[in-house]
Each structure stands twice: as C-alpha cells, then as structure tokens.
Amino acid sequence: MYRTNKYNKPLTIIVGVNQHFETCVFGCAMIVDETEDTYCLFLRVFLDCMGNKKPKVVLIDNDERIGFAVNQLLSDCTHQLCAWHLGNNATKNIKIPEFNQGFYDLIYTYYTEEGFEEKWADL
C-alpha cells in the first residue's frame, strides 16, 4: 500500500493503545518526503496536538530518519524496533529455519528475563 495514494506520498500513522488496551489511531499525515526534518516536524505537530504528552514506548521500523526524529523529540521514551521488522529481517538474512522459528518464538512469546536469556543462548 506504500505510496499508492493519488499524490504518491508516504502516509505516516501513529497507532497506540488506549486506557482499555484497545488499538487506536492517534495521528496520521500524508508527508511530503521522508527526511529527518519532515519526520521531526510531524512529531512536533503530533506532540502539540497531544498537549505535549509523550508516549511511553515507540516502536518503529529500521529507518534511520525516523529514528533520528524519535531520538530528537522522544529521547525519554523507550525506543525499540518493531517485532515484525525484526522477524522479517531475520528470515531474509538468516537461512536457517530452526533459528528463524526460535527467533519468532522469542519475539512473540513472553519470557522472564532469565528465561529469555536461556532461550537466546540455546538458539
């Protein structure tokens, strides 16, 4: 669906979880380009609309320009890569089915820190 609108512009969406743990859209914009400045402007406007209330956790893809904007404007938030992108990158770059299966298990199953470390060492 990327750039499939009639203006051929990227759509940026901020999705979150409300107080009832329901997924909701907090903001979206069709942006002019995907530069650091544009993402910074987008986040500034978003924060202004939200009364400068920042999210606790930010999940993004591996785009350095988004990462730059998040580090500049949301530096006090926990910033992590999206699990889908991590898993997708693993399957593209690591051609060992057992590893990929174990990696997906680590991403999508809850473990204590000790349990995670054990599973990771086994992997």
Image (cartoon, helix red, strand yellow):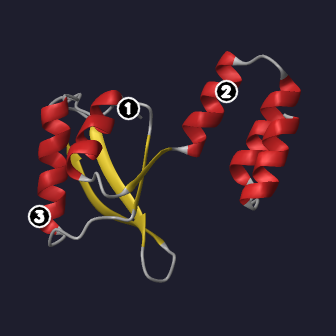
Which is more toward the observer, 86 or 79? 79
Is 24 rendered above or below residue 115?
Answer: below
**In contact (CB < 8 Å): disc 1 and disc 2:** no
**Residue 2: assigned label:** 1
Element type at mark 3: helix
The 10 Å Cα crowd at callout 2, few under 14, some 14 to 19, many 20 or more, is some
- Residue 70, located in which quarter of the rendered image? top left
Looking at the image, is mark 1 or mark 2 nearer the viewer? 2
x, y percent for residue 3: 31, 30
Disc 1 from disc 2: Cα separation: 22 Å
x, y percent for residue 99: 82, 29
Image quarter in which the N terminus is found: top left
**In contact (CB < 8 Å): disc 3 and disc 1:** no
Which is more toward the observer, 74 or 9? 74
Is 69 rendered above or below residue 97?
Answer: below
- Residue that label 2 marks: 90
x, y percent for residue 116: 76, 51
Disc 3 from disc 2: Cα separation: 37 Å
Let me know if residue 9 appears in the view. yes
- Residue that label 3 marks: 48
Element type at mark 1: loop
Between disc 1 and disc 2, whose residue precedes?
Answer: 1
